[in-house]
Image: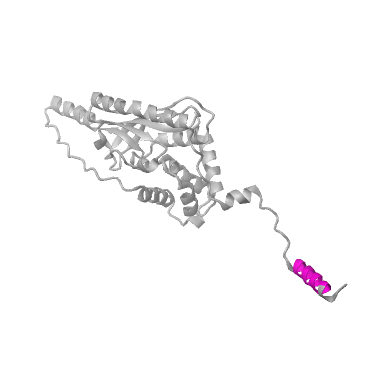
Amino acid sequence: MPATRKTAETSSSRSTAQQPPPKPPASRARQRAAKPSKAAAVPPAIAEERRRIVEVLKPVVEMMGRMLGPNTELVLHDLTQPDASVVAIANGHVSGRKVGSTILSGPKDDRAFGAAWSAATDLSGSGHSVVNVYPTLTGTGTPLKSATVIYRDADGTPFAALCMNADLTVFKLAHAWLEHAIQGAPAPAAAPESREESPDMDLLMGEIIRSAIRTFGKPVQLMNKEEKVHAVEEMLRRGLFIVKGSVGRAAAALDMSRFSIYNYLDEIRKREGFTK
């Protein structure tokens, strides 16, 4: 064999030997983790169904608001856009909201948040859900009587909520006035309530998380599981987990994993019967 040929073959074999072995193909799970997940596209028929129902409910909000009077607020939420969920509202002065307000700017202790979260995580139901009369509070502490209907689309996904919040202050004042009138005493004058503009979504999320953690007056590192479950339940009741990205923020604040937050939420749902 000629020397030049031997030299070429030797060089080729050395080059082949120096090449690193090919990497095994990444698993599908790793491939999914490497790419940011995208929300599944809503089928056109479902999107049209949602749009039609929301449009049908908008004039209902106006009509009921006029019929029930200025002390009863009617709010229509689009649950698919929590940053600006209020798409129709009547008598918004009750809670200080307007069209475009965030879903977290509503009354405190709203049981409908738990029902909405449960409906979003359990798609086995097909009908609309009614959360019957329950007490709530405005941001200024005024007690309200509330009720909510949560609407599902044909796939069972909750996409809208119609809420009613009644301020009974005037009726209580009228009752007190009648008592004073019967007894001959003058009726007290009602002081006007101040309504503040709702803070933005990011500030509301931070306030809800901090408030839930402050309940125990200790650093997160010293909180036990029961205390953390209680904090998560408080966040749930105030509607935090309807908002995209809230689970991650709550997990970071409580120094725990997102998986643990979901486990706590499932535990709360089973215990409180949110699925009913």
| Residue 61 appears in the figure | yes
The vertical placement of 180 against 15, above or below, is above
| 223 or 245, nearer to the observer | 245
- Farthest right residue? 1
Q: Quadrant of the N terminus?
A: bottom right
Residue 61, how many percent across, how many down?
30, 28
Q: Residue at x 12, y 30 (%)?
A: 185
Q: Is 254 placed left or right of 183 in the picture? A: right
How did the renderer colour the structure?
Answer: one colour
The vertical placement of 199 against 41, above or below, is below
| Residue 133 appears in the figure | no
- Farthest bottom residue? 3
Residue 100, how many percent across, how many down?
31, 40
Q: Residue at x 72, y 64 (%)?
A: 20
Q: Is residue 190 magenta?
A: no
Q: Residue at x 51, y 56 (%)?
A: 222
Q: Main secondary structure of the magenta part?
A: helix
| Magenta extent | 5-17
Residue 180, how many percent across, how many down?
15, 29
| 235 or 9, nearer to the observer | 9
